[in-house]
């Protein structure tokens, strides 16, 4: 009976260690932020006003920028919603240091 308990304990510990190592090596850090914006600009006596929410997220070598808001120009109102996605690639320089482009 002790033999089977020892084998079960060894298998459980091995699976737990393998799971922890897998999670540590395959997880990526993420950065995200959100901010409200309010922009007013005058071009040739035409006043442009835009306000809304700007958010950015960086994870897995991707940069996602999300812009949502309301644009007002000459009494007309427009809803603005844009989400550009940029994939960043490693560019090796000076041995082990690298930059993203």
Image (cartoon, helix red, strand yellow):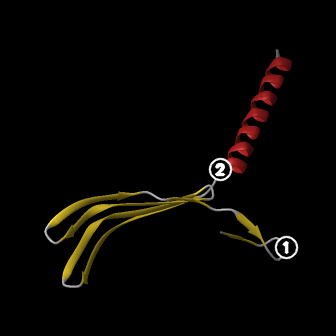
| Residue contact at pointers 2 and 1, CB within 8 angstroms | no
| Residue plotted at (72% across, 43% down) | 22
User: From the viewer's perspective, is residue 91 above or below residue 13?
Assistant: below
In the rendered view of the protein, which quadrant contains the N terminus? top right
- Choose between 41 and 95: the one closer to the eye: 41
User: From the viewer's perspective, is residue 5 above or below residue 100?
Assistant: above
For residue 80, which quarter of the picture?
bottom left
**Between marks 2 and 1, how big is the CA–CA gap?**
25 Å
Q: Nearer the viewer, mark 2 or mark 1?
A: 1
**Label 1 SS:** loop
Residue 6: image location, x then y, percent: 82, 25
In the rendered view of the protein, which quadrant contains the C terminus? bottom right
User: What residue would you read off at disc 2?
Assistant: 27
Residue 92: image location, x then y, percent: 78, 69
Residue 71: image location, x then y, percent: 24, 66
Q: Is residue 67 left or right of residue 10?
A: left
User: From the viewer's perspective, is residue 63 above or below residue 98?
Assistant: above
- Choose between 56 and 101: the one closer to the eye: 101
Task: Kindly identify which numbered label has been placed on residue 14.
Answer: none
**Label 2 SS:** loop
Tag count: 2
User: What residue would you read off at disc 1?
Assistant: 95
Query: In this view, which residue lies farthest toward the top?
Result: 1
Residue 31: image location, x then y, percent: 53, 61
- Choose between 39 and 78: the one closer to the eye: 78
For residue 78, which quarter of the picture?
bottom left
| Residue plotted at (23% across, 73% down) | 49
| Residue plotted at (20% across, 79% down) | 47
For residue 14, which quarter of the picture?
top right
Crowding near the residue tagged with mark 1, few <14, some 14–19, many ≥20 C-alpha atoms within 10 Å? few
Query: In this view, which residue lies farthest toward the left?
Result: 75
Q: Is residue 19 left or right of residue 45?
A: right
């Amino acid at each position: 009976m002790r033999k089977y308990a020892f084998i079960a304990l060894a298998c459980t510990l091995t699976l737990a260690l393998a799971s922890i190592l897998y999670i540590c090596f395959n997880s990526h850090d993420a950065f995200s932020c959100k901010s409200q914006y309010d922009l007013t600009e005058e071009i040739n006596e035409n006043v442009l006003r835009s306000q809304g929410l700007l958010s950015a997220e960086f994870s897995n070598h991707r940069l996602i920028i999300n812009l949502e808001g309301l644009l007002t120009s000459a009494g007309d109102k427009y809803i603005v919603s844009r989400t550009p996605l940029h994939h960043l690639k490693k560019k090796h320089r000076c041995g082990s240091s690298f930059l993203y482009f």
